[in-house]
Amino acid sequence: MAVPAKRSLTMSKTTRNRVVTSTVVIAGVACLLFSSLLCRTVVTSAAPGLDYSDVINVTTDPGPSQVAVSDMNLDGQLDLITANPSDHSVTILSGRGNGTFQTPHRYDLGGPSPYAVAVGRLNSDKLPDLVTANLMSSDISIFFNDGHGGFGPPVTVKADRGPISVACGDLNGDGLDEIATVNMGENSVDIFFNHGDRRFNKDLSLPLSAGSARALVIADFNQDGQNDIAVANGASNNVSVFLNHGRDGFSPAQTVDTALGPQALCAADLNHDGVPDLVTANGDSNTVSVLLGQGKGLFKHAGDYTVKNPSSVSVADVDGDRQPDLVVAELDNNSVAVLLGKGDGLFADAVRLPVNGEYVASVTTADFNRDGKADIATANAGSNNVSILLHGTRVPRIEKVTPTLMERVTAANGALSKEPVALFNTALDEKTLNDDSILLYGSQSGFHKAEISYGAANHSVSVKPEGSLAFQPGEWVTVMFTDKIRSLSGLPMSQPFTQAFLIEPTKGDGNFVETQRISCDKIPGKLRAADLDNNGTVDIVALCREVDGLRVHFNKGDATFNDHLFIRTGGYGPWDLALADFNRDGNIDIAVVNTFSSDMSIFYNQGKGKFKEPVKLPAGAGPMGVTTGDFNGDGAIDIAVVTKGFPAVLVFMNDGRGDFGKYISYAVAPSPYDISSRDVNGDGVPDLVMTNLESDRGTILLNNGDGTFRRPEEFPLLLAKALTQEPIDINGDGRTDIVTINTASDDMTVFLNNGGDNFKQQPNTPVGPTPTDKVFGDFNHDGLVDVALTLDGGTVVVMMNNGDGTFRKAETIPVGKNPTSPVVADFNGDGALDMVIANRYSFDLSVLLNLPAKEATGRQVQRTTHTH
C-alpha cells in the first residue's frame, strides 16, 4: 500500500536526472555522497590513462565536511560549495574556469550546524539555490540565489529530529525541486514540497523500519518519469527504496542488502542499460557495494569491493575509456580510491590517488577546467581545505631543488658556491618569476636581492644572489617559491615550496678559547645572533628577564662587543625571542614573548641598529617559546608561539607588510616548552616541533602547505625531561632529524628520519651532568654537523659528529656559572664557527672563538662591563 501524501499532487512529465545531492555523518562529520547539477555520469573525452598527478589546495572555512558543485552565478564556470558544521557556515568557492577558485565567501547560518548541503532550483527564477540539513537544531536552512551567485539570510524550516542528509529533486512534476531529508532521530524521510513563492512545508514523512538511516539520493529508479528516493541504512546493512506514485504518494520501502555499514550513497548508470544503479560506501566493512538496477525499482547486489574507511562516493569516467568508474573518499587515509569500471557493472581493484589534505570527508567529480575531462574535488575536514585533482593537467610543482641539506655550500663576496636551482614539472609563465614570487632569505641577514633566470628547455629556475651583503658561515639560507608562480595556463603551484640549507664554514678545527667576558648587572636570558645593523658582521641579542628588557650587543667585526643598546620589551617576563625580517625591508626585526603578561612584543628595525617602539600582540596564556618561518608560502615570515597556561601553539600569519592579525590556535600536549620550525617530512613546507617539559613526549605539527597544521603527532622522549630539541640533518642523508637534550638523564637523544615523518630513536649519548641547552654547527670543518652543549656546572662540552648519527666528546671548555642558550656564528669573520654563551649566575656572556691552537695559546680574556 502506498503512503499517501498530505496534499494533492499534480503530476506531469518530469525532467529526468535532476539535481541530486546527499550527505551522511561519520564520526560526527558530514560527508558528501553525490552532487552535480545533472545527476549523470561524468564522461571524459578520449584521453586514455588515469592521470591525476598534481593537486591544488583551496582554503575553506573551518571543518568542511561536504563539497558540492554547481554553477552558482551562471557564468559558465563551475563553483564549489562546502558545508562547515563546526563553523556554522556554508562556503562558496567561485570557479575561474581553469581549475582554480577565487577567495572563499562565507555564509553564516547564525547558529545551526550544517551537516549536509544540496543544490536545487527552489523557486521560479531557475537559479541554483542551496539547502542545508542541520542535525543539532532539527531544521533545514534554505539560501535563495540573488542572481549574482550570492545569497541573503537563510530561511529556516523545522524538520523531524536529527536531519543528517538532504537532497533536492522534482518529486511532483511541476518543474520546481522539492527538498528531502533523512532524519537520524526519527528514522524517517521528510519531504518538503515546493509551494512556490519561496514557501516550503514538511508535507510528508516516510517511515523507515530499518535502523540508522544515514544518506539519501533522488533518481527515477523504475523509469516511469517520476523521481524516487533511496536511503542508506547503516545499522541494518541495506538500502530502502521508495517509489513515487504521484498522487498516491510513495510506496512502502523495498530493501536491498549491502555490505556492513552503508553510510554513503550515489546513483548512476554503471552498465549502460539506461537504468539507474546504486553504489554505497560501507564504513563498517571498508567496502563499496554495487547495486545494479533491474528496472521497476528493483536492485541486485552485484558485488563488494575493498577500500579503506570510505566516507563518500562519486561516479565519473576518470580514465577516458567512456566507462563509468567509482571515486571513493577514504576518510583517514588522505586519499581517494579509484575503481575503474568495465562497463558491465564490474570494477577493478582500487587504485589510490593521494590528496593533499587531512580527514577526507567528501568527494565529488566534475569538469572544473572545461577540457572535457572529469576532475576530482575533496573536502578535507581536518585540514580546512578542498583538494582539486585535475585530469591530465600539469599543476606547477617542484620536482627537485639544489642545493640540498646534504650539499656543502659556502659564501664569499655576496655569492654562493652553489646557486639555488629548482626544476619544475611543467612550463612556467616567465612573467610571474620575479622577486615577489621567488625570495632568498638568510636567518642572520634577512632578505637578499636575487637575479631570477628561467630555462624553458627543462623548466628550471635559477636564483643568483645580488648585492654586496654576504651570507655568513652557520647561517640558514632559505629559498622561497611562492604560490604567485604560474604555469603557462595560469595555474598556481600545487603548494608553495621552501628549501633551506646551511652555509658551511671554510675553516676551523673545533678548538675553542674564551676571548671576551661581557658583564651584565642582571641575569642574562636567551641569546640570538644576526646582523642587526647591516654592516656585514653578526651581532648578539640577549634577553634580560629581571628588568623586562633586551640588550643588543653590536659586533665591531673582530668578535668584540663593546657597544650595546638596551630596550624595554613593554611586557613582563620576557622568556624567548626570535629574529627575522618581518616587513621585508632588509633589516632584522625582533619578536619577544612575555610569559607573565601573556603577550608578544615586536621590535621593527629602522636600520643602523635603531628600533621602533614595540608593537604588542596578545599571545595566549603564558607564552614560553617562539619561532618563525614562512608557513603559508606567501614570501612573508610568520610567527609561531607555544604557550604553557593553556597548552597550545599559536600561529600568527604575516599579512606581507609585517603586520600580524589574530592567531590560530592548535592544542598540544601539556607543558610545551621549546619550539622550532623546519621541514620535517620533506614536502617543502616548514613544520613545527616542540618538547613537553613535564611529559615523556615530543610533538610534531605537520604543515598542510597553506599555513594550517594537522593534528599533533607525538614521539617518545624516554622520560628524559627534554628541555630543548632541534630539527637538523645529523647523518648527512638529506633528511631532517631531531635531537633532544635531556636534563634529567644527562644525555642527548638522536631521532633519525627514515623518510616522511617516520623517526627511529638512537641509543642515548651521555654528555655530562645536567645539560641545559645546545647549539649545532660544523665546528671542525669536516662537512658534518656537530653539537655544543652547556652543562649546569659551568662548562661547554663539544661533541663531534661521527657521520652515522652518533657523536664523540671532543673537548670541555670552562665558562661562567649556569651557562645556557649558546649561539653560533662566524663572529670574527675568519670563516670558522664561533660561539657566545649566556652565564646566568655569573651575570655575563662568554665569547668563544674557534681558533687554531697556535693562535689560542696565551690569549687573554677581555672583560667588558655593561649596565642598563
Image: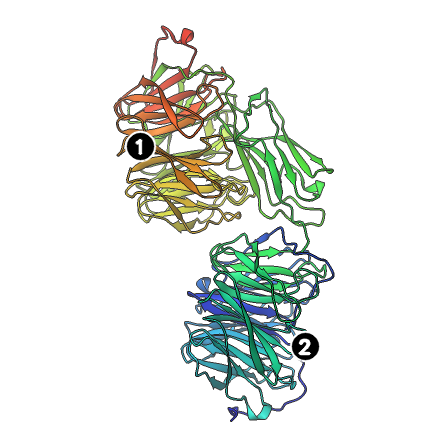
Determine the secondary structure under disc 1: helix
The residue type indicated by label 1 comes to: Arg
| N-term mark: 2 or 1 | 2
Looking at the image, which residue is at 71% across and 57% down? Answer: 48
3D distance between C-alphas at marks 2 and 1:
78 Å
Residue 632 lies, in percent from the top left, at: 53, 45
Residue 119 lies, in percent from the top left, at: 59, 72
Q: Which residue position holds label 2? A: 273
338 left or right, relative to 190: right
- Estimate how packed mark 2 is, as few (under 14), some (14 to 19) or many (20 or more) residues with alpha carbons within 10 Å: some
Q: Could you say which is closer to the camera, residue 165 or residue 707?
A: 165
- Estimate how packed mark 1 is, as few (under 14), some (14 to 19) or many (20 or more) residues with alpha carbons within 10 Å: many
All told, the count of numbered labels is 2
Q: Could you say which is closer to the camera, residue 823 or residue 302?
A: 302
In the rendered image of this protein, does residue 844 appear above or below residue 160?
above
Location of the C terminus (image quadrant) = top left
316 left or right, relative to 781: right
Residue 547 can be seen in this image: no
Q: Which residue position holds label 1? A: 545
In the rendered image of this protein, does residue 22 appear above or below residue 863?
below
